[in-house]
Amino acid sequence: MIEPVQIIALATSIFLLGLVLDLVRRKKLTEEYSFVWILCALALLGVAVERRQLDRFALWLGIYYPPAALLLVLTFFVFVASLSFSVVVSRQRQQIERLIEDAALLESRLRELADADRKKSDVNSATDSVASVIV
Amino acid sequence: MRTLVLIPAYNESQNLSQVIQGVRLNVPDAEILVVDDASTDCTASLLPKLGVRWIRLSQQLGTGAAVRTGLRYAAARGFETVVRIDGDGQHPAERIHDLLLPLLRGGADVVIGSRYAGGGATATPRLRRLIHGTLAWILTVLTKRRVTDPTSGFWAFGETALHLLVDHHPSGYPEPELLLFLSRNDLRLVEVPVDMRSRFAGRTSLTPRQTWRATARLLLLLVVVPLRSAVGVTRD
């Protein structure tokens, strides 16, 4: 017999899975970062469909109240997701640092080229002036 | 040997002119580069008037990234040695030659000006000396070579170190991590005793919060950096 909690879990997991897939479809979430959420939704779907598996898992862990095991699994997934996002943020920070350095180096190169150009044109105009005086 | 004197600076407009003057007087052949780490004082308007090469970062990235930017600049323009000197006037420019000497003789890849190597640094507060001493002892154990000044910002880099650090110079407050990294990659480090002064003017930009963050980061790095694999050094 299907219990109301199972229906809610089923609906939630299907909604979560649909939401993630839709975000990927609309390119709001890149494929690379969607996998952890898809895994999370599938795990929730699995325990919603096969309630007995959750009971067995809880028993194996020595947890006498099976929904607590579900909470444990969800907490684990949230932890994994947070860690993976920290990795992403760290990588992006390094990339941003590198970009700021690149921009500053390019700016200095441009300035040096402009200075050299200005000096060259100053020399040319001075040479022209001297030439006109001689002529 | 083409030498670039690299001055990372954050809000050092009161000191930069004097520091540059000292460098010009003592190493007239060297080029000078100031890397402004997005200062909020009038450093930006001062830079074009100083008559030196300069780079301005658009966002504050910290000393490590500022130094890395300077090293990238030096490597791209064919400099063979880089001397890093702070923009607050603590480091005596008259000792730059002493830092360059071991590089010129080929006996070192990196030279560090140490305020403790000669047993001096009496001007440094006792608590700070104690912290530096403890950190130096830990770094000596980890790197298996004598480290006396783990936070000195007075460095000279030879060509091998320069090309390695273009991609791998640490961010943040980099000195202890840099020591660990260089040691991990078997670069030859030499310390030279140097008397350091108090900053010319102004106050340090390091806030207590930043100090705690840097300390926490350092404690983690002391564990992690020795476990990282070497990146592979190409000797020129």
Image (cartoon, rainbow, N blue to C red):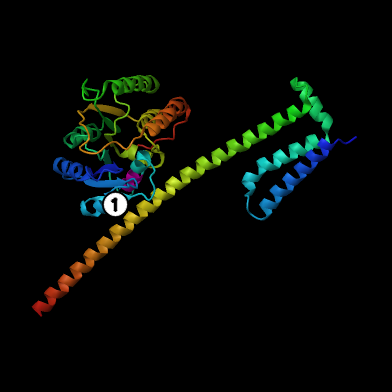
- Does the image show residue A99? yes
Write the residue at 46% across / 25% down.
Answer: B223
> Residue type at mark 1?
Ala
Q: Which residue is mark 1?
A: B44
- Rendered position, A122 above or below A38: below
Q: Quadrant of the N terminus of chain B?
A: top left
Q: Quadrant of the C terminus of chain B?
A: top left
Q: Say what secondary structure mark 1 lies in.
A: helix
Residue B81: image quadrant is: top left
Q: Residue B208 location, x and y as percent?
A: 37, 31
Task: Name the main secondary structure of what is drawn in magenta.
Answer: helix
Name the chain letter of the residue that bears numbered label 1: B
Write the residue at 24% across / 26% down.
Answer: B115
Taking depth in this image into account, of A31 and B111 the one nearest to the observer is A31
User: What residue span does the magenta drawing correspond to?
Assistant: B69-75
A13 part of magenta stretch: no
Residue A56: image quadrant is: top right
Q: Residue A62 location, x and y as percent?
A: 75, 19
Q: Is residue A123 left or right of residue A38?
A: left
Q: Residue B140 location, x and y as percent?
A: 35, 21
